[in-house]
Image (cartoon, grey):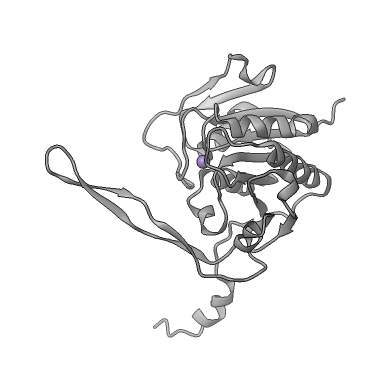
Amino acid sequence: MSHKPLILVTNDDGITAPGIRALVEAVAPLGEVVVVAPDSPQSAMGHAVTISKPLRLDKIRSAIYGKLQAYQCSGTPADCVKLAVSKVLHRKPDLLVSGINHGSNSSINILYSGTMSAAMEGGIEGIQSVGFSLLDFSYDADFTYAKKVARIVSKNILAGGLAPGTLLNVNIPRGPEAEIKGIKVCRQARAKWEEEFDERKDPNGRTYYWLTGKFVNYDKGEDTDEWALKQNFVSVVPVHFDLTAHESIANLNQWNWE
Ligand code: MN
């Protein structure tokens, strides 16, 4: 009898992105790997799910994943996780890894991120889940050190287990490894995007907009992910998806509800 852990790999940059191939290589020695990922880029889709059109799920027959089972899905990262669990694996995997994203998902970016929503969906389904992101948007980014981090984190999860309802948001500075100072467990920095819209005219004279925006960090705390990443540490933020403001319940119970 084999007791190899079952590991589901997904992402939001699409099944052909170098980052997901790096992640597959990172976790392949740790268990049986199945890939279910979007057939096209789905960055910034957040936790969207597809409800008004059919979802396609096709087995990958090209050689890019060798002998591994790999499927591309026409939906979002959250769709991929749902379909993977109910139509491909037919059981909960022991670990879900998402990424390695091309670009940061630190701080408030977690809410917009397809990478982290896939991990979040795993968490909701009761699967131990983690998202990995490299602070480099480039297609040709060097994933060597990020792969190492992904393997270390995944090994720890499989060995010790995460508390129920907790998942991890792991962000990795650009290498080389010699310049990276280590791994820090952090809290999410309080930051936001200040929206800017580039206003243009189409050939018919109608106005259209491109969302640009600037990331602003209001939080100088040295226990935050933004601080750690600035100092060239890997940031590991434990996250839960219960958005209740527990500290406000007592106050709301004092209101006059008549
Ligand atoms: Mn992405």
Image quarter (top left, top right, bottom left or bottom right) of the C terminus: bottom left
Residue at 61% x, 44% y: name it: 134
Query: Can see residue 106?
Result: yes
Give 31 or 164, whichever is nearer the viewer: 31
Please give the name of the residue rendered at 71% of the width and 54% of the height, measured from the top-left corner: 164
Residue at far left of view? 204
Task: Specify the quadrant that holds the N terminus.
Answer: top right
Count of labels shown?
Answer: 0
Q: Residue at x 56, y 70 (%)?
A: 219
Answer left or right for 155 relative to 98. Answer: right
Q: Is residue 246 above or below residue 130?
A: below
Q: Picture quarter containing residue 95?
A: top right
Please name the residue shown 42% across and 81% down the image.
257
207 left or right of 59 in image: left
Residue 184 image offset from top left, x and y in percent:
73, 58
Q: Is residue 125 visible?
A: no
Q: Is residue 88 above or below residue 258?
A: above
Rendered location of residue 31, percent (x, y): 78, 31
Return the x and y of residue 133 as percentages of the image width and height: 60, 45
Examine the image and state in which quarter residue 143 appears: top right
Compared with 133, 228 (above or below) is below
The quarter of the picture where residue 100 lies is top right
